[in-house]
Image: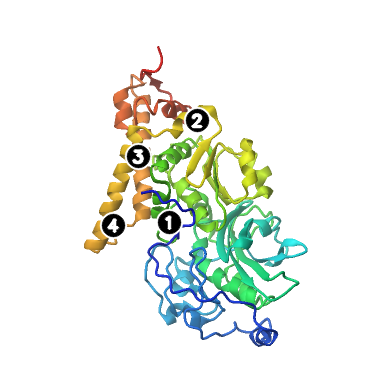
Amino acid sequence: MVEQSDRAPLLDWEEVPPPEPVPTAPSSQEENDLCSSPSNSRPVDNTTPGAGWNTNPGALTGVAAVTSKDLSSPVKHGGQEGDAASPDERDTTFPGLSVKDHAVTGWEEKDQIVAVFVVTFDTRSGNMVEWCLPQDMNLDGVEFKSMASGSHRIANDFIYFRKGSYFGLACFANMPVESELERGARMKSVGILSPSYTLLYRYMHFLENQVRHQLQCPGQYSPLEAFYEDKKAILPPAGNGLVTSCPTTALATVVNRCMHPEMKITHPAGCMSQFIRFFGEQIMVLWKFALLRKRILIFSPPPVGVVCYRVYCCCCLANVSIPGIGVSVPELRPFFYINVADINALETELSYVACTTEKIFEEKKDLYDVYVDNQNVRTHRESLQPLLRLNSADKEKYRKLSEQRQLLLYSQEVDGDCSANEEDLFILFFMEQNNRIFQTLCEVAGSSDPTLTADHVRAMGLDPQGDRGFLVDLLEVYGIDVMLVIDNPCCP
């Protein structure tokens, strides 16, 4: 059954401790005690058990002071449920990062961070970059990307975004303060930029800890400085966005693979199941638009973190593993969170998936083909209107997907089989569906009689009548030369 709430928790499986009171600003004496150490000293210690907060939007559970003692509670990343790192596996240099995350895969895992920054909300100037490394990095617009419009209404959030040729992840937090100058609230985001969005999740917990630290002790940047010095990427003089600190023989392969939207991104487990339950059968509508490389814009009020995951899931719908397919079509690029500062960039994009909290985008119909508001998928383009209607083949595909999910969940619960997960199932389900379509089309196109019949269409898992328009568009977009001879009963 489709969920009706747009604020559903992302990680349904995660055990969240009982919420503690939202921290208020410390008194002047307490703040002096907390922040009395010099900027180059070790992080402030804190013995509060379980300090920190979940990546679940709105699940604030206390002050995440920067300390190795706070890292004893389990942290789940990348779908590895319940694998809490032992104390000696924790990287105490950068609280929130485990040694496994720090060292896995050697150089590829390292030297990927091109910038680290702190954004604050100033009551007189608005959003502004408070601090960054390197200091000469062009961060214009990051202050709005890393603190989504409307965030003042929520306690915390995380945001994926694009900045030129880089991808960013920022963690936002909002803390009440007894200060007229700050109008009762202190809001900050701590974020990073990288050439790849597929590795950003590894630093989520570190950024969460750091944004809470910045709220408690504004101006203490030594942990961020050490983090950047350890993980910074060395850019070429031309500044074209390629990482040159990696071995040159593997550089191109790694950067291209990381930037390619078909690469499986390892987000926290629950991302795909949340997406499936939220949209239900409407996934099949989104699948067709994604395969046709349309410009898809998703609107939602904050928190925006879970909506960034929907952007990723939409991109996964269009995966094809047959060599040569899609090389001549626009790349379906994930923009993640966007705001009005991105309007000029979007005007030149032929295909993308993005999300926003700004309602003004709904009026700018020249920037998108498909607009998703909550669970309502719509298009203002008349030629695409028929694709909004579900046909019998769509419903059958969704039934099969649901069936496979239930079998997977059953095997995990009864047999304890954890060799597969919902993310793999979801990606493979649509990849196999897409492969079947293009394999059939290529075989027909290469035959002596390149005529696509109703039997071919059924073999692809499509409806000969209901999917006729979709097939016509698909053949045109991908430049496949076959003749479609399915009769349309609606025409004389």
Q: Position of residue 244 (x, y in %)?
A: 59, 59
Q: Secondary structure at mark 2?
A: helix
Measure how far apart labels 1 and 4 are at the Cα level.
15 Å
Residue at 52%, 41% (x, y): give it.
Answer: 331
Chain-order first, disc 2 or disc 4: 2
Along the horizontal axis of the image, is 143 left or right of 199? right
Chain-order first, disc 4 or disc 3: 4
What's the residue type where badge 1 is placed?
Answer: Cys
Residue at 41%, 54% (x, y): give it.
Answer: 274
Mark carried by residue 433 = 3
Q: Are marks 4 and 3 in contact (CB under 8 Å)?
A: no
Mark carried by residue 271 = 1
Q: Secondary structure at mark 3?
A: helix
Along the horizontal axis of the image, is 235 left or right of 103? right
Chain-order first, disc 1 or disc 4: 1
Q: Are marks 1 and 2 in contact (CB under 8 Å)?
A: no
The mark closer to the camera, 3 or 1, is 1
Along the horizontal axis of the image, is 32 left or right of 271? right
Mark carried by residue 479 = none
Measure how far apart labels 2 and 3 are at the Cα level.
21 Å
For the C terminus, which image quadrant?
A: top left
Q: Secondary structure at mark 1?
A: helix
- The residue tagged 4 is 409
Q: Secondary structure at mark 4?
A: helix
- Res 353 seen here: yes
Q: Is residue 342 above or below residue 207?
A: above
Out of 164 and 344, give the one closest to the viewer. 344
- The residue tagged 2 is 384
Measure how far apart labels 4 and 3 are at the Cα level.
21 Å
